[in-house]
Amino acid sequence: MIPTEEIKKLRSFHSDKAVKDKFVKRVLAHQKADRIAHGFYWDGGHGCAVGCTLELSNNDGAVHKHFQEQLGVPESLARLEDYLFGTMPTDKAAKWPAEFLKAIPVGADLSLISPKFIIIILKDLVKQNYVKDDKAVVKAVLDVAQLWARVLKGDVPKNEEWSAAWSAAESAARSAARSAAESAARSAARSAARSAARSAAESAAESAAWSAAWSAAESAAAYKMSRTLLRLLKKAK
């Protein structure tokens, strides 16, 4: 996600409004026909956000690179669009490909959108109640945010600086994300378990409740992040 010289020179939709119009029209047609779906890139009629945009499968493993080549949108943003689509609720996911493309101005430099997005998300973690009271977690998250802030200024940190911060921050991020669902999941699990007559049923009920609560929390977080990304894209120049 650190912008290379190639990415810095790239301009959205190759500075051609006709390119944007072509792909927006395509994804809107897929949306209207209910052909946007989770679980695969493209099967010749249905597909995910990236698949329906390109009408390409990922058989060569380079579908996000093709996105960059055809739309002039950095590969890192294609991967981010893909991740958010796959995680957000189905009803909102169907609208996401068109929202994503519409938000991008023609001819914009998008090379710093990913670092800006990462910084916002990391700082947002710190603001949450389940993070801000843990000084070690706060430091780990803010240390990585600071490295990305240097990227925005053109001062790319050395590999050893990333390595030193990454391990602690990765662990902190997993802990923070899981905590978002933990309280609701435990409550739902206990309720389900109490209604079960046997220990085996209790175990199954707890597992199902935990999974459902975690999935719901993750979907809600993805949708919130998608709104943040749209705001950044709309401001790009």
Image (cartoon, rainbow, N blue to C red):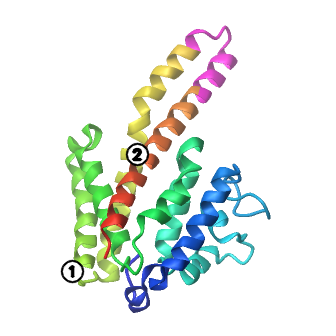
Residue sitting at x 42%, y 84%: 11
Element type where label 1 sits in the image = loop
What is the crowding at mark 1: few (fewer than 14 residues within 10 Å), some, or many (at least 20)?
few
Q: Indicate the amino acid at tag 2.
A: Ala
Q: Is residue 35 left or right of residue 169?
A: right
234 vs 63, nearest the viewer: 234
- Rendered location of residue 232, percent (x, y): 33, 64
Q: Is residue 37 above or below residue 10?
A: above
Q: Quadrant of the N terminus?
A: bottom left
Q: Is residue 1 above or below residue 127?
A: below
Whether residue 48 is visible to the viewer of this picture, yes or no, is no
Which residue is disc 1 drawn over? 153
Label 1 close to label 2 by CB (< 8 Å): no
Q: Is residue 95 left or right of residue 229?
A: right
Whether residue 27 is visible to the viewer of this picture, yes or no, is yes
Q: Which mark identifies residue 221?
A: none
> Is residue 25 within the magenta segment?
no
- Rendered location of residue 50, percent (x, y): 61, 65
- Rendered location of residue 226, percent (x, y): 43, 54
Q: Is residue 121 above or below residue 91?
A: below
Q: Which residues are magenta?
A: 193-208
Give the mark, 1 or 2, whose residue is nearer the N terminus: 1
Residue sitting at x 24%, y 84%: 154
Which residue is disc 2 drawn over? 177
Element type where label 2 sits in the image = helix
Residue farthest to the right?
Answer: 44
> Is residue 205 within the magenta segment?
yes
114 vs 164, nearest the viewer: 114
